[in-house]
Amino acid sequence: MTRIDFHTNIADKLSYACRLARKAYAAGGKLVLLAEDAGQAASLYDALWTVSETDFLPHVMSGDALAPQTPIIVTDSDQADFPHGDMLVNLTRRRPANVDRFQRVFEIISTDEEDAAAGRIRYVAYKQQSYPLTHFVAGQS
């Protein structure tokens, strides 16, 4: 069953997603970064080029011909056909379709109250469906 990890109290969702992508790629993982809209997807795509001066994070937009060979895919559509199903990083306020196709889902929740409220609704929905859940609160030890 898909494991779902909630990361809450995140000040900058794009930077956080980039760090998660860096960590996952370093561990040999493949992931899909799901953005709220095309603008956020473009910002995320650009941000992945500047994560660090020494790291290269190979990434493409969903639908690119190189997607099957690329470990990091950026999209704003959860309906796309993804070539791999290791991890999904959800930056949206909606519950992604087909979460069961991924081994692990990261729900990234900002400090914004509307984003947090939407995250709580997703948490309850996942819990009612008996998904294994974890919760990490940024800034707390």
Image: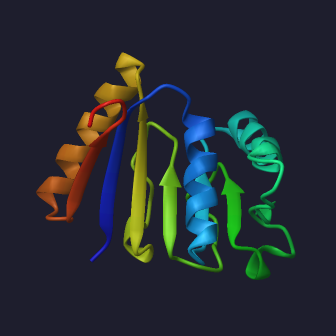
Which residue is situated farthest in the top direction here?
Answer: 113
Closest to the observer: 57 or 115? 57
Q: Coloured how? A: rainbow
Could you tell whether 116 is left or right of 71 in the image?
left
Image coordinates for residue 42, horizontal then vertical, percent: 79, 41
Could you tell whether 4 is left or right of 23 in the image?
left
Could you tell whether 97 is left or right of 40 in the image?
left
Image coordinates for residue 68, horizontal then vertical, percent: 75, 81
Residue occupying image coordinates x 81% and y 56%: 54
> In the image, is residue 35 above or below residue 5?
above
Residue occupying image coordinates x 25% and y 37%: 121
Which residue is situated farthest in the right direction here?
Answer: 65
Residue 79 visible: no
Image coordinates for residue 110, horizontal then vertical, percent: 44, 29
Residue occupying image coordinates x 35% and y 17%: 113
Residue occupying image coordinates x 26% and y 37%: 141
Quadrant of the rendered image containing residue 83: bottom right
